[in-house]
Amino acid sequence: MRISIVGSGYVGTTVAACFAELGHDVINIDIDETVVETINDGEAPIHEEGLSELIAAHTAPNGTGRLRATTDYAAVLDTDMTFLCLPTPQNDDGSIDLSVMEAGASQLGETLADKPDWHTVVVKSTVVPGSTADAITPILERESGKPAGEAFGVGMNPEFLREGTAVHDFLNPDKVVLGADDDRALADMRAVFDPLVEAADAPVVETDTRTAEMIKYANNGFLAAKISLINDIGNICKEFGVDAYEVADVIGLDDRISEQFLQSGVGWGGSCFPKDTRAIISAAEGAGYEPAVLNAAVEVNDRQPERLVGLLADHLADQRDHRVDGAKIAVLGLAFKSGTDDMRNSRAIPVIEDLQARGATVTAYDPVVVDNAPNYVDDVTYADSAAAALDGADGAVVVTDWDEFAALDEEFDAMETAIVVDGRRIIERRDGITYEGLTW
Ligand code: UDX
């Protein structure tokens, strides 16, 4: 099929490259000329495992490959369907900000006014239940001057891609969710996903747009709450001198629980869990329901960074009456998880802010996040290695589970006071350091 994809961020670019890999003709539409040029040059505009290989394989000189990019919405006219992969940020109160989606729908609608034949529009961005039918579809109808269901169809297809493994996740889905409010749109969505469903033998769920939208929030809310629950249990374990990881290994053997997402520590961050939990809580409250468990999941997540810094402060107080005030603290890891250069909502942000509020000076090291860190935290010195960050430090906290931290050893000897508080269970306990795990 001929597919246009509006928005070329983490999701849009990955989805475009993967659809090309599946044999479709794909055009990415983005307002950012640099992004467009990068794709047309056969390169990935973002760091995502396997993505540059797919883009290089499917772009070709003079736009003759299966994958191309443009800034011009008119490209939609030469395609059968359009996926909207635009950002859905949050307002200050946590509710979803649909303005970028609405602007995209408006431009798409205007373009569709000139399309004589049927077109299917699919919302891929994460939007609260009802957004597709109640906000996006009316804009498309207004701007195109055509009725939905007759001239064009609208669907909703949530994504479950993890950053760092997005290409693998797309090509090996554990489910494909196709939400549509009319049969023709659903048939187009089936056709586009057919090669993937066959190759990956993935279960397909066909439903309406509202349910598809909710499935995404339920998925992310459940996973975020699962991590917060194991963090809550981990905090209890800590009080009783029990290793939460040993407990998690055993409860994970229960099929009903499963071993995934049971790593307790400093909590969840990133572009999805924090935003999506708050958005669905806000939407639920707007509808008159107070979601107690999801609210608690957010509360536990907010507390973990504070607990990490608290443990460090206790050790500093124990050892030679050191205080956090005036101490030099090494923060190991800035990315919200390993394998990505993304610092959005990283737990490193509240950890650093808390350390600074208590009077510490912070030296941070991350193997990937470098240039964009100052967008998230102020007054931090950046070291170019973990060893340099630890050198002369009065204490260290570990925020991201980068593999290279597991190999640290004599680097700790250069610390002024070798106190290490680990928020990700990545450092080995060893002689010569005071080691403290957050939940073990
Ligand atoms: C998540 C969802 O997994 C994905 O399906 C959705 O499409 C987008 O949001 P992502 O944000 O890339 O993906 O990261 P993920 O690997 O799920 O991790 C999220 C956060 O949870 C990270 O900060 C990670 O460190 C933390 N986490 C994860 C834990 O603290 N413990 C765990 O056991 C697992």
Image (cartoon, rainbow, N blue to C red):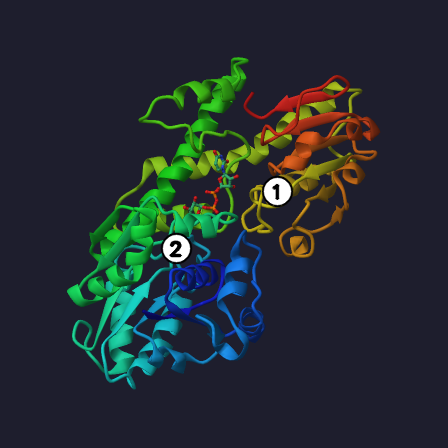
Label 1 near ligand 1 (CB < 8 Å): no
Ranked by sequence position, the earlier of labels 1 and 2 is 2
Identify the residue under disc 1.
348
Is 82 placed above or below 415 here? Answer: below
Q: Quadrant of residue 348?
A: top right
Tag 1: amino acid: Ala
Is 256 placed above or below 155 here? Answer: above
Is residue 98 something one can see in this rendering? Answer: yes
Q: Nearer the viewer, residue 357 or 373?
A: 373
Per the model, the C-alpha gap separating discs 1 and 2 is: 24 Å
- Is 242 placed left or right of 24 in the picture? right
Q: Position of residue 315 (x, y in %)?
A: 70, 22
Is 238 placed above or below 21 here? Answer: above
Q: Position of residue 65 (x, y in %)?
A: 47, 72
Tag 2: amino acid: Ser
Q: Nearer the viewer, residue 77 or 336?
A: 77
- Is 285 placed left or right of 424 in the picture? left
Q: Residue drawn 36% across and 47% down?
A: 173
Q: Position of residue 25 (x, y in %)?
A: 39, 70
The quarter of the rendered structure image containing the N terminus is bottom left
Identify the residue under disc 2.
95
Q: Nearer the viewer, residue 131 or 333?
A: 333
Q: Residue drawn 21% across and 53% down?
A: 206
Q: Nearer the viewer, residue 241 or 94?
A: 241
Is 293 placed above or below 429 here? Answer: below
Of labels 1 and 2, the one closer to you: 1
Crowding at dot 1, Cα within 10 Å, few <14 / some 14-19 / many 20+, comes out as many
Helix, strand or loop at label 1? It is: helix
Q: Position of residue 91 (x, y in %)?
A: 44, 58
